[in-house]
Amino acid sequence: MTPPKSLRIAKTAIDRSATALMPSRAGDLTVYAFEMNDGREAAAVVSGDVTGKDDVLVRVHSECFTGDVMGSLRCDCRAQLEKALDIIAEEDGVVVYLRQEGRGIGLLNKIRAYALQDQGRDTVDANLELGFEVDSRTYEVAAEILNHLDVRSVKLMSNNPEKRADLLRHGIDVRDSVGCITETTPHNQFYLDTKRERCGHDL
């Protein structure tokens, strides 16, 4: 069900969209590209027919150039994205891809944070030392996209309780959460420990 207008965020309404088929390593998917009326862009990759459906499996994934594209082993982002795509290819679902690199601080500042991590800070202290919040991401764009796709309620694939809380605040009916756990390696152990111990992720 589309949430009441009082819950919708007009400043992030979808201005333009485009749709195409996308064969992928996970299977044949449909990709939707969106431009919001504040200039932000985002995408959704859909498997099957989710229109008007309840309990749709949804992964809301924030852009990670270093992990998703370049294969960095410092994080679990690429592993989570690939796992989500594989799962939705088997059961109808959606991966929403948001352009909010580095927990919302952008690529340049993310690499600055990497440099501080090389000196021993964790991801939380690195962001704070650069003058940012621990996590600057918001999910109103994801909510707008799910409304556009006419997804009635979702089963959220996430380890981050704040993601679920923010989607609920923006009117998305999150019926359940399922983890997106991937392999821990020597390269991402400190990163994952910080997510669990300081960011409250369910890991």
Image: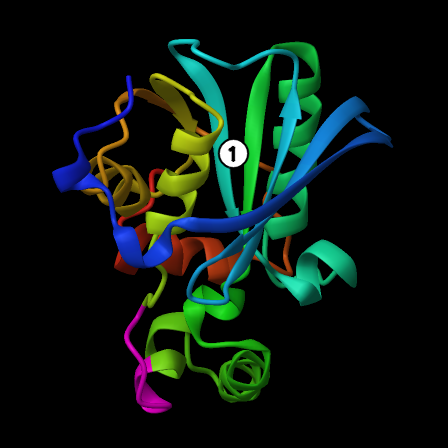
Crowding at dot 1, Cα within 10 Å, few <14 / some 14-19 / many 20+, comes out as: some
Image quarter where the C terminus lies is top left
Say which quarter of the image contains residue 45.
top right
Residue at position x 50%, y 33% from top?
59
- Quadrant where the image shows the N terminus: top left
Judging from the image, what secondary structure is the residue with disc 1 in?
loop
Q: Residue at 28% x, 75% y: name it.
A: 133
Q: Does the magenta stretch include residue 7?
A: no
Q: Quadrant for residue 21, please give it.
A: top right
Of residues 40 and 197, the one nearer the viewer is 40
Task: Name the residue tied to disc 1.
Answer: 181
- Magenta segment, principal secondary structure? loop
What residue span does the magenta drawing correspond to? 128-134
- Residue 161 versus residue 38 in the image, above or below: above
Left or right: 73 as drawn, with respect to 138: right
Q: Tell me the kind of residue under disc 1.
A: Ile
Tell me where residue 107 sits by quadrant: bottom right
The answer to whether residue 49 shows anywhere in this view is yes
Residue 130: image x %, image y %? 37, 90
Q: Residue 79, how many percent across, how many down?
A: 66, 42
